[in-house]
Amino acid sequence: MSNCKEIIWTDYPERRCSRKAKLDGYCKQHHPASVKKRQEDSERRQLAIAQREIAVLKQREIDLVNVLAKLHESVCYQLGPSDDSSPYKVNYEIFGEVKEVLSATKQQR
């Protein structure tokens, strides 16, 4: 049996694989069908990871929009005539929610 005909890179450039040829002159690792299958599996795993990350980002976006809507409702409503110099009332509890969502977003990055 001869060695695999795949050219590989090691310490010295362009050296043939030292494994014994089993399939069409290639070892099991370098056979084109095996290489193609490994690449497809890798791409499938990367796609699954990307889809999970997209789902997480979409959920984070929804959470942030909801918190910002609450913040807008809480902060930006006009009060009637008051002795205070500001015509707006601020609900500071809502800022705690905003801070929690933003800190969770930073931790998940």
Image (cartoon, helix red, strand yellow):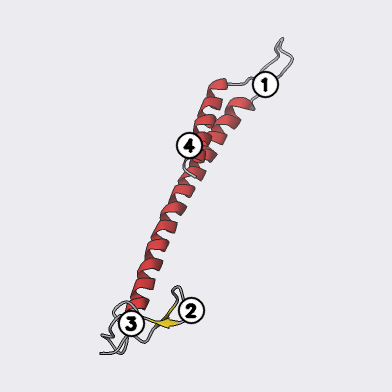
Distance from disc 2 to disc 4, alpha carbons, whole Å, reads: 48 Å
Residue at 27% x, 86% y: name it.
23
The residue singled out by tag 1 in the image is 88
Distance from disc 3 to disc 4, alpha carbons, whole Å, reads: 46 Å
The amino acid pointed to by label 4 is Ala
Q: Relative to the observer, which residue lies in front, 26 or 36? A: 26
63 vs 74, left or right, is: left
The residue singled out by tag 3 in the image is 31
Residue 69 location (% of width, % of height): 56, 35
The amino acid pointed to by label 2 is Pro
Kindly state the secondary structure of the residue where label 4 is placed.
Answer: helix
Q: Relative to the observer, which residue lies in front, 108 or 94? A: 108
Which mark sits nearer the N-terminus, 3 or 4? Answer: 3
Which mark sits nearer the N-terminus, 2 or 3? Answer: 2
Residue 100 location (% of width, % of height): 49, 31
Mark number, residue 104: 4
In this rendering, which labeled residue sits more in front, label 2 or label 3?
2
Residue 56 higher or lower than 63, as above or below: below
Residue lying furthest front in this view? 12
The amino acid pointed to by label 3 is His
The residue singled out by tag 2 in the image is 13
Kindly state the secondary structure of the residue where label 1 is placed.
Answer: loop
Crowd rating for badge 1 (residues with CA inside 10 Å; few <14, some 14–19, many 20+):
some
Residue lying furthest top in this view? 83
